Amino acid sequence: MESQPLWDWARDHGIMLDNQAVIVDEGVAAALMKHSGDRAYIRDNLDQLVLEAEAEAYRIYLEREAAFCARVFQSYGDDLVNRGEANSVSELGAILGKDYRRFDRFFLSLGQSRKSRSGSGFERINRGFLEALGYPFTFQPAIDGTPDFVLPSEEHYRTNAMDCFTFTAKRTLRERWRQIATEGAHGLGFFLATIDDRITKPQLEEMKTHRINVVCPASVKERAYPTAANVLSYRQFLDDHLDPAMERWQRNGVIAAPS
């Protein structure tokens, strides 16, 4: 009979890796609190802060991952000793050696968890900064193209889609950007936030024909896409697109004016 997967064994013994969403939110909070949550500073330095939050969230994740593994291995070894299956270091080593496939599957699961973190984590980083800066949005709206965010709201999108932005965050793009172009999304503009520095020129040209703009940290834009017209820094996205839209939405009563 195949032994219980070590990941499941750990869960059954109350040993769990911290929720990835919580870890990412801690990374965003750490990046924000370095500057005391100063909204003006955050806005002016958003390009760098996105990278700081990504790095901080990854650092926290690796720290929690190491602590999780240490607890799993210690508890697993203690359990073998307590059940009398191992009475010496050599016996314990022999059992662990025979159980190597169990550990191999455990590390595969750990790697999958890490990949999942990097994918959903970047989305939460962008959500954290939009919230910190007070921009209105609906998260994961039930609309065509399934973007991560619609600004200013799903309600306004259903009333006047051409007055709205759809905004999706993907750490790496690959071919996933086509989802927006092929699933019938409408809107004033489509924006894809990323830190991917490997988007090809033909891909960028195709995105441009579909009115899709890439939003990335200024350092990534300057290094990888210095002449691409449809690649914006975060600061350009705010200055040239989102802030003018905010003024229009407030003027037209779509959102409340700041008090």
Image (spheres, rainbow, N blue to C red):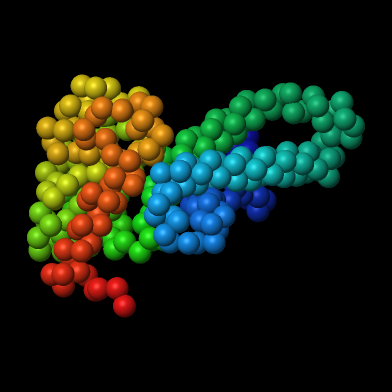
Quadrant occupied by the N terminus? top right
Residue 124: x percent and y percent? Answer: 42, 51
Q: Residue at x 23, y 62 (%)?
A: 246
Q: In this picture, is 131 found above or below 211?
A: below
Residue 123: x percent and y percent? Answer: 38, 47
Quadrant occupied by the C terminus? bottom left
Q: Is 193 displayed left or right of 1 in the figure?
A: left
For residue 197, say whether it is visible: no
Q: In this picture, is 140 found above or below 176?
A: below
Image quarter of residue 163 = bottom left
Q: Residue at x 59, y 31 (%)?
A: 107
Give the number of callouts: 0
Using the image as rendered, state which of residue 259 and residue 181 is in the foreground: 259
Q: In this picture, is 173 found above or below 126?
A: above
For residue 96, say whether it is visible: yes
Using the image as rendered, state which of residue 79 and residue 107 is in the foreground: 107
Residue 113: x percent and y percent? Answer: 51, 39
Using the image as rendered, state which of residue 139 and residue 55 is in the foreground: 55
Using the image as rendered, state which of residue 84 and residue 41 is in the foreground: 41
Q: Is 248 displayed left or right of 62 in the figure?
A: left
Residue 258: x percent and y percent? Answer: 29, 73
Q: Residue at x 28, y 60 (%)?
A: 137
Image quarter of residue 253 = bottom left
Q: Residue at x 50, y 61 (%)?
A: 37
Outermost residue, bottom side: 259
